[in-house]
Image: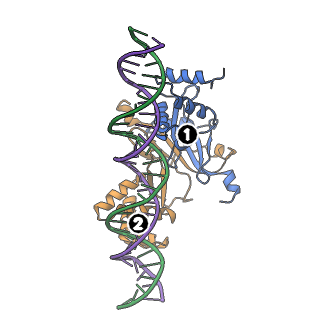
Chain colours: A orange, B blue, C purple, D green
Amino acid sequence: MALTDKNQLRQTIRNAGLRATPARIETLELLHGVKYPVTHADVAHHLSGLGFDQATAYRNLNDLVVVGIVRRTELGDHVWRFELVGNEDPPHHPHPHFLCVDCGDVSCLSEIPLPKASLDSIDQIHEVTEILLRGYCRKCKLNGI
Amino acid sequence: MALTDKNQLRQTIRNAGLRATPARIETLELLHGVKYPVTHADVAHHLSGLGFDQATAYRNLNDLVVVGIVRRTELGDHVWRFELVGNEDPPHHPHPHFLCVDCGDVSCLSEIPLPKASLDSIDQIHEVTEILLRGYCRKCKLNGI
DNA sequence: AACCTTATTGCAAATCGTTTGCGTTTGGCA
DNA sequence: TGCCAAACGCAAACGATTTGCAATAAGGTT
């Protein structure tokens, strides 16, 4: 009955024009269960524990990105991360992330005010689709960097 | 006499505690000549034209980063980019970049006002060292994306 | 100016994250 | 139920980056 119900997930996938395979359903379930972007490796590891090949994990994530169910992000540490696009309105609006360069933790900063107006005034920029901040998180500060 | 004078570069390298080898001097000269971050491959290609190995290019860039002469950035396309730290004050202040996900061009947005205050108020963040924007540049918009 | 120590280099092989070729399996519409 | 393209598993290919090792060279010392 929940939105993460297997049949619901199956429907989401089918509506996007993809076949609802077990690996894809598992992938979406995993993505529904986290609150920050996960890496290719995270998903591949999870799926391989269920008997799926990691190439399948990679391919499915990319497919889900292509059809717009999932968003792919690069946070500066050379690995792709994935998160559900979700039902935001509009669905693809800029979504800032913060990556701690020390511990690798990622935070979603959906509520932070963006300097949208000033960005629009920059000559080179037509449209900003993503904003990423990097630095040190408080936890790592406490551990004495 | 210029700051990019070979002897000046040699001195900069020596002051940082590294040996002033021809490859390093060439690397710094190249970095002085550009106004946006260049990739490992850019530098490696330039140096290999001068008879240096690409492993040398990679190692030198990383060394220059370690000693603080060069800054390493990741703009979301899975390649490291490098730029001089320069004589800013303070030398490592957040330095926003814009990457066009279509054509790959990079712009430095050193003058754009940052929401510094609001960032500091985010719980997870202790210090922001880098800001990156991605999207489409005007040039690519004109070419009809 | 020759000398010694150790950082740096060249080359090739290794590694990491990711993608792809190909023959086999499977989802889902007819 | 049967068909066919989509998706799979496997293993090999890939591009960016790093590393091991023996040879070379920077720069302080004599």
Camera-nearest residue between D25 and B143: D25
Identify the amino acid type marked 2: Leu
| Disc ID at residue B43 | 1
Q: Horizontal and vertical percent for residue B20?
A: 51, 25
Mark-to-mark CA distance, 1 and 2: 50 Å
Q: Horizontal and vertical percent for residue B18?
A: 47, 25
Q: Quadrant of residue D21?
A: top left
Height in image: A120 above or below C19? above
Q: In the image, B27: left or right of A25? A: right
Q: Secondary structure at mark 1?
A: helix
Height in image: A13 above or below B41? below
Residue at position x 67%, y 44% in the image: A122
| Disc ID at residue B120 | none
Identify the amino acid type marked 1: Val
- The answer to whether one can see residue B92 in this image is no
Q: Which residue is mark 2?
A: A3
Q: Chain of mark 1?
A: B
Q: Horizontal and vertical percent for residue A77?
A: 44, 45
Mark 2 burial class by Cα count in 10 Å: few <14, some 14-19, many 20+: few
Q: In the image, B9: left or right of A137? A: right
Q: Quadrant of residue B87?
A: top right
The lab-note entry on whether marks 1 and 2 share a chain reads: no
